[in-house]
Amino acid sequence: MTVSASEGSVCIIAEAGVNHDGDVRKACALIDAAVAAGADIVKFQSFVVDAVVTPAAPKAAYQVASTAPDESLHAMLTRLQLTPTEFTTIADHCRAQGIEFLATAFDAESLALICSLGIRRLKVPSGEITNVPYLRAIAAHRLPVLLSTGMSTLAEVSGAVGLLREAGVARDQITVLHCTSAYPTPMADVNLRAMTTMGAQLGLPIGYSDHTPGWEVSVAAVALGAIVIEKHLTLNRHDPGPDHAASLEPAEFAAMVRAVRNVTAALGDGVKAPQPSEVETAQVSRRSITASTAIRAGEILTPDNITTRRPGTGISPLLWDEVIGSRASRDFHPGEAIDFPGEVIENPRGMIGT
């Protein structure tokens, strides 16, 4: 599946999530910030509270720490829930700003809503990777799937991939995202090598959903082969709310995007060969075979009358053994580049001497 913004690039998802705090105007401001930062996709979360949690469901520890302690999970999600009309506004604003709209749907009604808004792919959140009916509902839409894998074993990830495929999602339509579901994630718990393990074992494209402080791990993930990076975006990391503390502010997000783009460009095509920017340097810093003394035409060339010196515009020293024992084609002054009689000789090792 091609999830990148362009061939060979990394797809960067700005996870706005619920950092809008229930305000559609703030959601639109997050879209604007994602566009300005250079993200390819901006993603939200769509849910019907009563379809997702019971009134007695507890908050996670990080949610307790970042929201009012006497506010229940049900009440918190109710406060953060957006209406279908508000999601239409968000999708329209994404189109107007030229960025792809995406939302994670946590229930059947929300899934139907976001699909009606013209999304191009679906995201399975980590918490739903063992939810068989949910995965089948995702697969029924026959869209590319980003599968987040926080809290999972490789066997669970493999099982989810198998279920998606059985339900109709093609293998090349699935990308697995390594993730640690801790907000923020301690560096010791990132286990980034597990991302490459998943890719190798499952034979699927890989990505990384980053909840660490800062953004260096996202850059490292790209260096290891991630083609998708997802990172939370907030307008103010100190705002009250469950995800602000594990998010990047706009300037930080833009810096991450620049770093990812630079690393992607630096990875290159993997072929070890001189690069265009090296050509001039090679001529200056490499050597040619030159006369070390005055040489008369017909004189035999030996280590006593030739040497190697810069620049590398003459015969390459790789041809040293071929030159030794040959006769000088003409007179040479000390320091003058040696040449062969007749046509240019091509070095069989791939270097060309003139």
Image (tube, grey):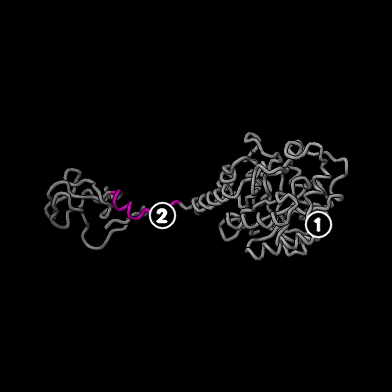
Taking the magenta stretch, the answer to whether it contains residue 281 is yes
Camera-side residue of 247 and 182: 247
Overall secondary structure of the magenta stretch? Answer: helix
In the rendered structure, does residue 198 fall within the stretch colored magenta?
no
Secondary structure under badge 1?
helix
The residue closer to the viewer here, 196 or 245, is: 245
Q: Residue at x 61, y 47 (%)?
A: 249
Residue 207 in view (yes/no):
no
Tell me the residue that label 1 is attached to: 110
Residue name at image x 13 percent, y 51 percent: 295
- The residue that appears at 82% across and 55% down in the rendered structure is 136
Query: Given the image, on which type of amino acid does mark 1 rest?
Result: Ser
Relative horizontal placement of residue 326, taking residue 229 as reference (left or right): left
Within the image, what quadrant is residue 329 found in? bottom left
Q: Is residue 305 visible?
A: yes
In what quadrant of the picture does the C terminus appear? Answer: bottom left
- What residue is pinned by disc 2? 275
In front: 139, or 234? 234
Which amino acid type is marked by label 2? Gln
Outermost residue, top side? 188
Q: Residue 266: percent from the left, percent from the top?
A: 49, 51
Hey, which quadrant is residue 275 in on the image? bottom left
Image location (x, y in percent) of residue 145: 72, 56
Nearer the observer: mark 2 or 1; the answer is: 1
Tell me the crowding category of disc 2: few under 14, some 14 to 19, or many 20 or more residues within 10 angstroms, Cα based. Answer: few
User: Magenta part of the protein: which range?
Assistant: 272-286
Q: Where is residue 189, by image quadrant?
A: top right
**Reading the chain from its start, which is encountered first: label 2 or label 1?**
1
